[in-house]
Image (tube, rainbow, N blue to C red):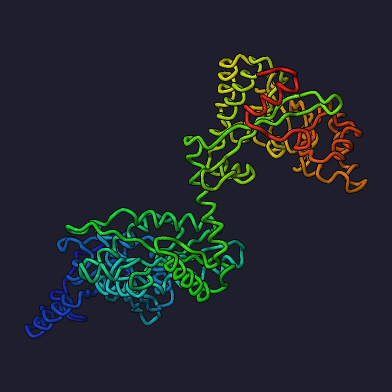
Amino acid sequence: MSPDHQTPAATAADAPLPGGGGAAPPDLHQANARLLEAQRLARLGDWRLEVGSGQLHWSPQVYAILGLDPTGAPPAPETDPDLIHPDDRPVYEADLARALADGTPYAHELRILRPDGTQCHLQALGHVECDPAGRPTALYGTVQDITDRKRAQQRLDFLAHHDALTGLPNRSLLEDRLAHAIRRTRRDGGHLALLLLDLDGFKTINDTLGHAVGDRVLAAVGTRLTERLRGTDTLARHGGDEFLVLLDGNIDASGAAAAAESCLQELTAPIAIEANNIHVSASIGIALYPTDGSDAETLLQSADLAMYRAKQRGRGRYQFHSPEMTAAIQGQHALEVALRGALARGELAVHYQPQIDLTSGALWGVEALLRWTHPELGAIPPARFIPVAERLGLISELGDWVLGMACRQLAAWRASGLHIPGMAINVAGQQLERATLLPTLRRVLEETGLAPGDLDLEVTESVIMGHNPRVITALSDLRALGVRLVVDDFGTGSSALGRLNRIPIDRLKIHGSFIRDIGRGPREEAIIRALIGLGRDLGLEVLAMGVEREIQSQVLEAVGCRFAQGYLLCPPMDAAALGVLLARWAGLEL
């Protein structure tokens, strides 16, 4: 804090001479004037604080440096730490206390918060004057404004690690961050990716529009790419028309491909410079750690090779260092794009597969199965596109569509005279989490005239055994409505068997992998017998899926599995074909 008693500051010109009481002679006044001018030019001020009396002497330049009123006597950094930046205050106060305790001089670089809100950097030097007994009697020293010097140094430091044109990190800083990320990833596990982006045909822009325009294009590209990337990523200018992107944070191949696609998309819009709408594209090479290199240099080389492969393939695209991975990721992306519009384009259909009573051969029910036929890719298996739909958040929309189609088809078959006991429909976990499934089901039942008991809603074992309270609530609400609940793919998850008794399940559906193993030996038959026995002991009906051979049907019937479905009994068909088959079974003509 400030001392209790301060005297108004005295200038160096009118400060009393040590040991004297009279006015200074003319030659001393001239010397003081020259000293003041030198301090002004050097932005340097001197001060002295008497420890006992708290009397403070400043030179005029101290006022100017601190931005204070020269007619007053406000506190100085030596007497009031509130002028000092909070981050610099602890070290300064500790050294000041040490100086007063043992006479140790101090030197600091401090940030000062001026009254007008601006900040300056000071170099402060302090010394201690002691009496013959060694007790501190005064502090004296200098303060110098080094703000311009610090700003120049900061600018030099920035330019040493950043590109002057775009303001982005340069290759040196990127390599430093890459090496750090590799060390951390090696220690903690995970992955990271490096993208090398090269503008296609940039030389033409320089040659036709000039280098000044080319520089503005590079700056615009840097700005656009920065907006597309996450805060944890680093975008750097590699040199010329090349940019590097470090994707940190345990990024995988799919995430790297998505980032590359995002960068390419960002460059599709023209860049307006003066009267020109400049179109640019880029080729991107992708290298993954640790697959394509365990150090920064190797990853850069791998990304560079991948980028040249991308240019050879036609530009405006990305390429992994591994061509096989590129093909797989691009195929996955193409599948995602195609699936988004598949329903609107009429590429999706519902096929139906009968479920048979093995003891009598009678129809027990029909399962609705979603099928996708792409005009170019052909028939795409559900095992391939259903996970994609779940990842894209489309599964609820598709599930609701199947629910409506299947219920309307069941109503149509019954109206034509076919007796079909029920319709089994798969329900995804995302549908159960939404609050719209129950009202959607009620609406469909009202529209079709079906009863809740006409439907079997099949939910995978992993969903049933999860701990999502919204899912459990939804299952209870559906069961209360009157639909039957079926555990699909039973035996493939980590079943908490006690939960089966607490959730309102009606049936178990044994996964086809267990059925496929029937006939290989007594061990496989024992497993099937145990699964069926479990269901029977729990009071649940059991159905086996994936029955494709006669031996499987025979063993299932022998061990007490009454219901089954599979290609041996009847393959999935579209509604028209299955309707004809069911009518033939029933002796009807449709």
Q: Residue furthest front?
A: 589
Taking depth in this image into account, of 119 and 249 the one nearest to the observer is: 249
Which corner quadrant of the image does residue 325 belong to? Answer: bottom right
Residue 176's place in the image compared with 546, above or below, is below
The C terminus - image quarter: top right
The N terminus - image quarter: bottom left
Q: Residue furthest left?
A: 26
Image-based side of 430 in relation to 420, left or right:
left
Image-based side of 59 in relation to 228, left or right:
left
Residue 566 x %, y % = 76, 36
Taking depth in this image into account, of 310 and 84 the one nearest to the observer is: 310
Which corner quadrant of the image does residue 537 belong to? Answer: top right
Which corner quadrant of the image does residue 12 belong to? Answer: bottom left
Task: Please state the total of marks drawn on the protein image.
Answer: 0
Residue 473's place in the image compared with 127, above or below, is above
Residue 384 x %, y % = 61, 46
User: Image point 35% across, 66% down: which residue?
Assistant: 199
User: Image point 87% across, 42% down: which residue?
Assistant: 527
